[in-house]
Structures are given as structure tokens and as C-alpha cells.
Amino acid sequence: MKDPYPDGMAREVMRLMRRSDYGGKGKLRSYPMTFKAKDERVVEGNLSANIIYDDDGRELASVGIFVDLEEQLHIERQLQRTQEQLLQSKNWSPWAASPLRSPTNSTTRFTVS
């Protein structure tokens, strides 16, 4: 497989994993970044990775998982545009927008028991 990291990013990921402020030494937790897919498309997501050490504490390998957030980010951007349009609307009502401010709360608020 072709290198999925943008130029210089593989070194940056290793540098971040060696620090302690991104999930602990040898760990990188939910770090936002972009990757190139096989079809050369740029994909937004989060990377979580770990360094694997031997018994003497030497680095043996690294392993990572990339979570594609394209669909989620697309929906969030659509929601943001809708909120902006609603704010500019002449028919604006604060009551109508309250579920838009916190969409996760609105689903519980209207749940039928």
C-alpha cells in the first residue's frame, strides 16, 4: 500500500506518540488528521496509535487505527449551515432553534416512554 500519511506526517505521529501529553508515553489518542485514500481522496478522521515495546523498553513497532469521520463531519457542517440560515431567517423563533442548539438533547426530550 502507498504511504497514507501526508508528507512528513509519519515522523510527526511518531514524535507525538513518544510524548506523554497525547494519551501517555507510547500512545496517541483520537488525534485529528487527514489521510489519502487509495483513490487519492483526502479523508478526514482521527488517528489512535500505540508503540509496541520489548521487555527492555525498546521500540519494536507501532500500530494505529484511523477512524473515518467524513460522514459525521458532513452532517455537522450541514447542521451548522442550517443553524446559520435559521438565524438569518425572518421567521426566526428561539423556541424553534432550541433542539438545533443541542441535537442530542432534543432526541431524549421528545422520546415517548
Image (cartoon, rainbow, N blue to C red):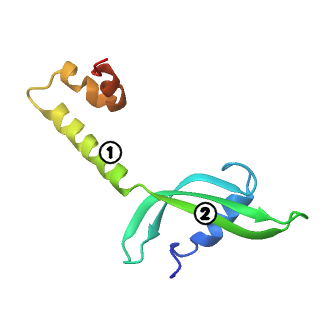
Q: Which residue is mark 2?
A: 64
| Label 1 residue SS | helix
Answer with left or right where residue 109 lies relative to residue 49.
left
Could you tell me which residue is drawn at 51 percent across and 82 percent down?
1
Q: Nearer the viewer, residue 56 or 12?
A: 56
Q: Residue furthest front?
A: 113
Tag 1: amino acid = Glu
Q: Which residue is mark 1?
A: 76
Answer with left or right where residue 91 lies relative to residue 20.
left
Position of residue 37 measured from the top left corner of the image (x, y, whole percent): 42, 72
Position of residue 26 measured from the top left corner of the image (x, y, whole percent): 74, 57
Q: Quadrant of residue 99?
A: top left
Position of residue 92 measured from the top left corner of the image (x, y, whole percent): 14, 25
Could you tell me which residue is drawn at 84 percent across and 66 percent down?
54
Answer with left or right where residue 44 lies relative to residue 46.
left
Neighbourhood count class around disc 2 (C-alpha, 10 Å): few under 14, some 14–19, many 20 upward:
some
Position of residue 59 measured from the top left corner of the image (x, y, whole percent): 80, 68
Could you tell me which residue is drawn at 16 percent across and 21 percent down?
93
- Residue 106 is labelled as none
Between label 1 and label 2, give the one nearer the viewer: 2
